[in-house]
């Protein structure tokens, strides 16, 4: 029954991702904005107005950053085929032993089986413009839904919690539920906001280092933003970032300097992951690397990039619930 229930929950999470992901993303952004709204309320600013200021400010910053990144991203997309073509001889030289091994294995398989590879038929889609016309409105609707839900979670989240707790009959259940919800909101919002600030600083420092190496400011901001976003996915994100930085370094620089972008990225990630984040957050929010990898694999396979973004906050939320539930603290320690 447990196995069947797990399979059923996984199927529902995958099939209903169009409904679940906007809700989870809006809760994620609301957790980032709630500490800022509390500061604004201490300044006698109403919660409604404070949430509106946070939403407008976040959209303004995202729009300003996107405006700065659109041009270098488009230029890089145009130049990427040419740069990768120039990079092809270097990559072929590096992968030559692997290619020779593959050819030897294919020759051995043909000699052993005596069969030739059947011709392959490649199908191409001809409806790309029509797909873009149908996908763009759906994406805009999802973005608008996330913005509206974030605003409503910020404004009416407390009332929703209070009314939901009132539905419980037992006073002990109400007390336990209040403690769990307050713990999740306080600690998870602090965790998400702290990680966001650390990732922004990592991205800015990395962008400054790339500009010092000779890249233009818009291009350096592009890769700094990528580094900040990838840092939300532990282990997996930095590995992707190092691979991308190796390609960028080999296309932009010559000689040993080509390894500097990946080296700087690895150094920043090591300092952040092993020194800065443990000091700022302490051991309370730490999760087992094995649990993190499994969580990233599960949520990444279910929801793609957004799943990688939400994996760590969801695991932290589960850990906090287990710590506050009687008899489940052993499972919480298992996640550490």
Image (spheres, helix red, strand yellow):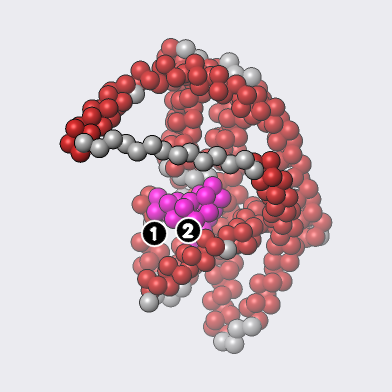
Q: Establish if 201 lies above or below 307.
A: above
Q: Residue at x 63, y 24 (%)?
A: 78
Residue tagged 2: 315
Q: Which residues are magenta?
A: 292-318
Marks 2 and 1, how far apart at CA: 9 Å
Left or right, 60 with reference to 108: right
Instruction: Residue 12 in the image: state x and y as whole percent.
Output: 52, 66
Circle 2: element type: helix
Residue tagged 1: 335
Mark 2 touching mark 1, by CB under 8 A?
Answer: yes
Looking at the rendering, which quadrant does residue 148 occupy? bottom right
| Residue 307: in magenta span | yes
Residue extending furthest toward the left: 112
Residue extending furthest toward the bottom: 169
Q: Establish if 275 lies above or below 154.
A: above
Q: Residue at x 65, y 24 (%)?
A: 75
Left or right, 248 with reference to 21: left
Q: Establish if 168 lies above or below 270.
A: below
Q: 159 or 120, which is in the foreground?
A: 120
Circle 1: element type: loop
Earlier in the chain: of badge 2 and badge 1, it is: 2
Quadrant of the rendering where the C terminus is positioned: bottom left
Mark 1 is surrounded, within 10 Å at the Cα level, by few (under 14), some (14 to 19) or many (20 or more) other residues, namely some
Q: Residue at x 63, y 62 (%)?
A: 19
Looking at the rendering, which quadrant does residue 256 occupy? top left
**Residue 216 shows in the view:** yes
């Amino acid at each position: 029954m447990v196995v069947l229930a797990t399979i059923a929950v996984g199927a529902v999470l995958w099939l209903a991702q169009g409904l679940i992901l906007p809700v989870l993303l809006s809760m994620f952004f609301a957790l980032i904005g709630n500490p800022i709204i509390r500061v604004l309320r201490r300044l006698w600013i109403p919660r409604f107005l404070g949430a509106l200021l946070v939403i407008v400010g976040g959209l303004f910053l995202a729009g300003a950053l996107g405006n700065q990144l659109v041009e270098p991203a488009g230029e890089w997309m145009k130049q990427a085929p040419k740069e990768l073509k120039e990079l092809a001889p270097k990559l072929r030289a590096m992968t030559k032993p692997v290619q020779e091994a593959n050819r030897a294995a294919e020759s051995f398989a043909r000699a052993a089986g005596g069969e030739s590879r059947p011709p392959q038929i490649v199908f191409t889609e001809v409806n790309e413009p029509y797909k873009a016309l149908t996908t763009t409105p759906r994406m805009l609707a999802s973005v608008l839904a996330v913005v509206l839900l974030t605003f409503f979670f910020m404004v009416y989240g407390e009332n929703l919690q209070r009314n939901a707790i009132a539905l419980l009959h037992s006073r002990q259940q109400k007390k336990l539920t209040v403690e769990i919800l307050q713990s999740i909101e306080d600690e998870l919002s602090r965790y998400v906001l702290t990680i966001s600030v650390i990732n922004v600083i990592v991205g800015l420092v990395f962008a400054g280092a790339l500009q010092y190496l000779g890249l233009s400011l818009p291009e350096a901001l592009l890769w700094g933003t990528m580094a900040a976003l990838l840092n939300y996915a532990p282990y997996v994100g930095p590995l992707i970032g190092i691979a991308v930085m190796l390609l960028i370094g080999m296309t932009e620089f010559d000689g040993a300097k080509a390894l500097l972008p990946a080296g700087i990225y690895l150094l920043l990630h090591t300092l952040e992951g092993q020194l800065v984040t443990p000091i700022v957050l302490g051991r309370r929010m730490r999760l087992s690397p094995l649990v993190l990898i499994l969580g990233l694999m599960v949520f990444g396979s279910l929801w793609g990039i957004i799943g990688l973004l939400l994996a760590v906050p969801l695991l932290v939320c589960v850990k906090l619930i287990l710590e506050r539930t009687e008899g489940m603290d052993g499972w919480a320690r298992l996640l550490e």
